[in-house]
Image (spheres, rainbow, N blue to C red):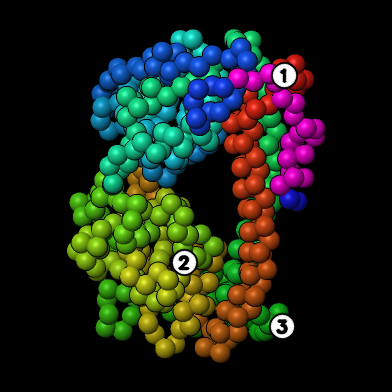
Amino acid sequence: MNMLLEARCAHDRRWKQYPAYKDSGVEWLGVVPEGWDVKRLKYCAARINEKVDGRESNLPYTGLEHIESWTGRLTISEEISTSEGQSSRCEPGDVLFGKLRPYLAKVFRAKEHGICTGELLVLRPKDVSQDYLFSYMLARDFISIVDSSTYGAKMPRASWDFIGDLPVLLPSEAEQRAIAAFLDHETGRIDALIVKKERQIGLLQEKRTALISHAVTKGLDPNAPMRDSGVEWLGVVPEGWEIIRVKLLEGNDTSVVQTGPFGAQLHASDYLDDGVPLILIRNVRDLKIDETGIPRVSEEDAERLSMYRLSIGDIVFSRVGSIGRIALCTEREKGWLISGQMLRLRIQNPRLDSKFSTYGFSSESVLTFVELQSVGSTRESINTDILRNMPIPIPPLPEQRAIATFLDRETGHIDILTTKVHESISKLREYRTALISAAVTGKIDVRGDET
């Protein structure tokens, strides 16, 4: 379904415009409805800078990692979940705005008393409603202007001095309420469509996982004679397949399973927007490494951490959080670094096909094994010993290659369908953002709209 059809599902008629417009006096805002005021942000919302020690507070904590970009919804994160230092206090009615990497559009409506990271500006509305200000600060042009003002190469931030001087369009209180109610309703309808499509992706991923798991543990011949593998969680495997622990494939290279650098070796403050890519858990999906939003480090840091660089044919394996995310290193990723969240498997053995190995390590059987073996009192994790002692089924080499070819073809079909659904979701999100911008800048008139 294309963007136009999706948009019609979200709303099935053309929008009307205001009867009259005037020049706002601000180039990037252009014309605005007559009767709307233009006021600097610092005069319609106060910045609250009340600091507390997060370690001593029992209030709920909100970090940048907990706010979904462009929607303001709270999300579950694999990153920091509690404050370990100084935080800012917020209360119901406040609007929180992410000043670090503002292009991520992290804006949040506080509904309860809490604390938040200092990277969020706490704004308390005075002459504007919370819901309207929240939507206004999510408008594309507002985010773009703020992002253009950032300073700092490693951690680009915007200053309150700049943000506070930005103009805010102020319709009447009644119009503010109407716009906020309209956007809550319409974005809710769009979000419901997105949820349905995300479920489609989930079903496709389940089919993909089941297909891989069956092929790498049972083979392609449904009539092949089977035997007990001797491994409870693996069950039966075809006759002629071996069950071998990873460490027995290493030869003399005992560093075949390698963890990434830990916190003392590399900090998040060392991340750059340019440089050598550093692979985090979030960058690994569908047996590939996704470069979207990947952090980078300097050439100097990469050289210092050269033992964690990737070679073609290496397998990266997540060891904490979402354990078992896996990808194969290709020519593109050669020389990239793994983070402390990852393990690197370098099994250069003539008995193994690298593509088959990647599929094998991503099977449900392997995930069952690592879940059973995972360690850590507060966060599941695996170490090099667990992975080195993992038993894996190994068919004859020609059969490995046949299975890999089969899975390349079949998962390729599923991936094409998945990509199309992702593209549809992306267009819906673009439409969502455009709708917010149009409403809060008066490009469409939603007064009297029945929701």
Crowding at mark 1 (Cα within 10 Å: few <14, some 14-19, many 20+): few
Sequence-wise, the earlier of marks 2 and 1 is 1
Structural distance between the alpha carbons of marks 2 and 1:
56 Å
Please identify the residue farthest to the right as the structure is shown: 13
Q: Give the residue displayed 68% in from the left and 47% down from the top.
A: 197
* Residue, disc 3: 223
Structural distance between the alpha carbons of marks 3 and 2:
31 Å
Crowding at mark 3 (Cα within 10 Å: few <14, some 14-19, many 20+): few
Q: Secondary structure at mark 2?
A: strand
* Residue, disc 2: 327
Where, by quadrant of the figure, is residue 33 drawn? top right
Q: Nearer the viewer, mark 3 or mark 2?
A: 2
Numbered tag placed on residue 19 in the rendering: 1
Residue 209 on the magenta segment: no
Give the position of the C terminus as an image quadrant.
top right
Name the residue nearer the viewer: 88 or 169.
169
What amino acid type should be assigned to the residue bearing mark 3?
Asn
Residues drawn in magenta: 3-22
Sequence-wise, the earlier of marks 1 and 3 is 1
Q: Give the residue displayed 73% in from the left and 40% down from the top.
A: 7
Relative side of 156 to 244, left or right: left
What amino acid type should be assigned to the residue bearing mark 1?
Pro
Q: Give the residue displayed 50% in from the left and 30% down from the top.
A: 27
Name the residue nearer the viewer: 74 or 208.
74
Give how far across and how far down residue 229 sits, in percent: 53, 76
Give how far across and how far down residue 157 sits, in percent: 33, 37
